[in-house]
Amino acid sequence: MKRDMELIRKLLIFFDEKPEPHHVQVPPIEAYDELAIKYHLVLLHDAGYLRCEVVKSSTSDRTIYVVPFDLTWEGHEFLDRIRDQHIWNEVRKQIRDRGFTAASVEFLKTLADAAIRKRLGLEQPKR
């Protein structure tokens, strides 16, 4: 299964806006099935963006699924970069304009930071 950054963003927003600290087994994200959501919850946990209880295989150390509760500090930090729809659209446009279909999280952070600086009028002059 491929990583879907749109789903990652939607899950981060869901957990940020969730009013109570209780777990949500499978967040109701429109247009995504349960399998895709659960896979991405494990990815978010592995990345350190979600605080979860981990359910491991009884025969190995493999994570079967996670029971997510809320965002970690790093989860909030990443979401703060990509929460704004205008910034997110700009990041996605920059990736498409360069001919990419996907990008690393670190590169997304760099693009988001540049878009935020530009929007705030803090863009460095080009040399």
Image: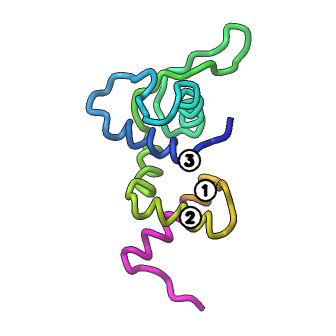
**Direction front: furthest residue:** 31
At 62% from the left and 64% from the top, the residue drawn is 96
Residue type at numbered disc 1: Glu
Label 1 Cα neighbours within 10 Å, binned few <14 / some 14-19 / many ≥20: few
Residue 53 vertical placement versus 12 (above, below) = above
Label 2 Cα neighbours within 10 Å, binned few <14 / some 14-19 / many ≥20: some
Label 3 Cα neighbours within 10 Å, binned few <14 / some 14-19 / many ≥20: some
- Residue ID for mark 1: 106
- Label 1 vs 3, first from the N-terminus: 3
Q: Which residues are magenta?
A: 109-127
Q: Quadrant of residue 19?
A: top left
Element carrying mark 3: helix
Residue 59 vertical placement versus 63 (above, below) = above
Image quadrant where one finds the C terminus: bottom right
Element carrying mark 1: helix
- How far apart are the alpha carbons under marks 1 and 3? 12 Å
Residue type at numbered disc 3: Met
Question: In front here: 30 or 37?
Answer: 30
Foreground disc of the pair 3, 2? 3
At 61% from the left and 60% from the top, the residue drawn is 107
x, y percent for residue 88:
46, 59
- How far apart are the alpha carbons under marks 3 and 2? 15 Å
CB atoms of marks 1 and 2 within 8 Å? yes
x, y percent for residue 62:
69, 20
Image quadrant where one finds the N terminus: top right
- Residue 5, numbered label: 3
- Residue ID for mark 2: 110
- Label 3 vs 2, first from the N-terminus: 3
